[in-house]
Amino acid sequence: MIEEHERVITDWRRVFPALAIITGLFLTSCSTHDDGRFKTFAEGTLEIAGQPDSTRDFSGFEVLLANQLDGDIDTLAIATTDMDGFFRLDISAVTGGIYPLIVRRAGVHLSTDQFVIAEGDTAVISGTYPLNGKRLRIISRENSAWMAYLNTKAQHNASMLRMLEAGDSAKQSIPQIAEQTAAILWSLRSLYSGTFGADLASVESIQMLEGWNDPLVVDRIQELRLDNQHIVDAVRSARRSEARIAGLDASIALISYYIQELDDVKAVAALTAELVIAYSDSLRSEEALEAALSLRRGFPDSEWARWASRAAYELENLLPGMPAPPFSVKTRDGGTFALDDANGRYFVLEFYEPLNKAFRQELAERDAVFAAMNPLMFLTLSVSVETDDDINEALFEEGDHAGLFAFAGSNESEIASVYNIHVLPTRFLIDPDGIIVAKYSGLGLRPLEKDLVALVQGVLVNLSTND
């Protein structure tokens, strides 16, 4: 029984030997998984609305379950209705999950629904075409849970939209709506225990509360089953909530607990990567490096190994307080710029792609912030990693942009590799002595702006004191 897997978690804030766990995790966490296929079925009836009784021929509906693999559509199961509209889908699957259920007739696509395949779960499907915007009726425990999840999310989105449209007159706030939706999502685990929908809903409930009700996040993670396939996402949220409540050491103990308790190797790898981030956040760089190297040793020739290598490089070369790696690039105006050319000023080194969504989202504010920077105190160099010069130049057809620019791709520069760029935009703040002050990845302009303002205020204070 699934209930037998539920465990009560003891207080992880106790002293926890995290590095000992990391050293041995790949010996204790590996387990073999049965990759054999399981069989189930779905059956039902499809009809056409308004068809005269004398010609009740509902044959020819083609019902199929599709599985998309690397861009190709693979048919998991297919059936065709008889004269009465009856069909039976015999399903054979390696893994359960959410799959598209497609209905066609005479080559015409009629509908696509989401269908849950799970071992031991059979379904009854019915519908009358045209559906007129409705879904097929799919009756099974798994599919009922999935519909409950989808309906709850739809209601949440509608509530958020009403609140935004109401503006200042809104009776509810975002935290209130989040807590209400989170409560409904959490309730699905008791109504549909062990289903795909309930498992996802319980984790999304935890994620939705993060930052709004951190104590409840930490309480709920303790009630989550360890075999929940989305547990890594829940632990990530709980780690951040625990850090806000009890500090970074407590959040590290939380992750370490789950690394020890989980049996799924992929989940353990993902949480080990999260542990690297947590150690780094708490400025425990040696332990972060050891965790990254353990991850690389445990998963050689994998994406985790590559991630760990990048993390190790970052920890050894790009942390705040370390010298910024030297470089030299050709600028868009034909000059050459090297790190030493900052000439004792604070220096923002930005990496971007002209068409990157996050960069475009921040572009106007970025220009305003960088244009307002005093050139006697600050300098900005923006390096595009886009290899197409036409795309790079198209950015400037829209207008001028603040700062110096260089195109790393066309110059075959290694600067993006030296600065370990894998998320765009990424910005580094470097002090007048060439020391890294901070790094900002993704939508990180606001934190950078706050730090720049703090620097200006600090410099002005120092100048007035010296006077």
Image: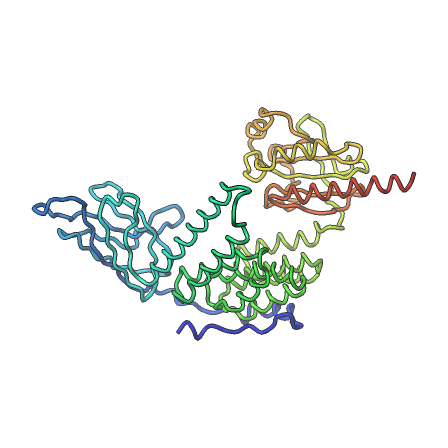
Measuring from the top left, give residue 162's x and y in whole percent. Answer: 47, 44
Of residues 365 and 316, the one nearer the viewer is 365
Q: Which residue is found at the position 70% from the left and 49% from the top?
A: 318
Visual colour scheme: rainbow
Q: Does residue 48 appear to the left or right of 298 in the view shown?
A: left
Quarter of the image for the N terminus: give it. Answer: bottom left
Residue 296 visible (yes or no): no
Quarter in which the C terminus is drawn: top right
Q: Is residue 226 above or below residue 160?
A: below
Percent across and percent down for residue 375 are 77, 32
Residue at left offset 41%, top offset 71%:
2
**Image x and y of residue 301, in percent:** 53, 56
Query: Is residue 223 visible in the rendered structure shown here?
Result: yes
Residue at 46% over, 48% down: 159
Q: Which residue is more in the foreground, 258 or 466?
A: 466
Q: Quadrant of residue 248?
A: bottom right
